[in-house]
Amino acid sequence: MAARSVLAVAFSGVLAPQAVPAADRYPLQIDRQPVVRVLLELSKQTHLQIVGIFPSEPSEGGVLVGPLRGEFTADRALQLLLQDSHLTFVRVNANTVAVMSKPATTTAEVVDDRS
């Protein structure tokens, strides 16, 4: 079994975050870059805390995601940025989003037991 590195990230756009409704829209300017940098930039631009623990493969910076330009809610921005990666997210509260690896999918064998 190949060794997997784990990267832990915790970003905060502000020192003392204020409550931010999930529906607020933000003018975002995020370039295509490693996912860790994208999450840091999204945190800065939205003032949200973004936390996560996930495998950092294929490199320490993770996969490339983005770019994203325009006005989006934080949730929609995360959906778009993470859609082609191995990552997903859940909103913890109005201030915090947790990013994690997508659950492993398994292929179930369908058995037809009709005789």
Image (cartoon, helix red, strand yellow):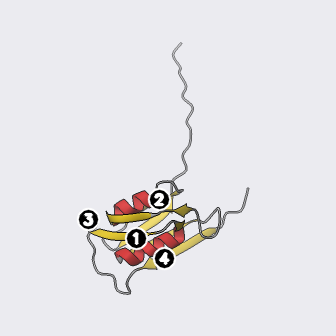
Q: What residue type is labelled 3?
A: Ala
| Separation of residues labelled 4 and 2 (CA atoms) | 17 Å
Q: Can residue 50 be seen in this view?
A: no
Q: Name the residue under label 2.
A: 82
Q: What residue type is labelled 4?
A: Ala
Crowdedness near tag 2: few (<14), some (14–19) or many (≥20) residues, C-alpha within 10 Å:
many
Residue at horizontal 41%, vertical 62%? Answer: 78
* Labels 1 & 3 near each other (Cβ < 8 A): no
Choose the circle earlier in sequence order: 1 or 3: 3
Residue at horizontal 42%, vertical 80%? Answer: 12
Q: Mark 3 points at which residue?
A: 23
Q: Can residue 11 be seen in this view?
A: yes
Residue 61 location (% of width, % of height): 60, 70
* Labels 3 & 4 near each other (Cβ < 8 A): no
- Which residue is nearer to you in this view: 107 or 72? 72
Residue 87 location (% of width, % of height): 50, 59
Mark in the foreground, 3 or 4: 3
| Separation of residues labelled 3 and 2 (CA atoms) | 19 Å
Choose the circle earlier in sequence order: 3 or 2: 3
Crowdedness near tag 1: few (<14), some (14–19) or many (≥20) residues, C-alpha within 10 Å:
some
Label ID, residue 10: 4
Q: What residue type is labelled 1?
A: Gln
Crowdedness near tag 4: few (<14), some (14–19) or many (≥20) residues, C-alpha within 10 Å:
some
* Label 3 secondary element: loop
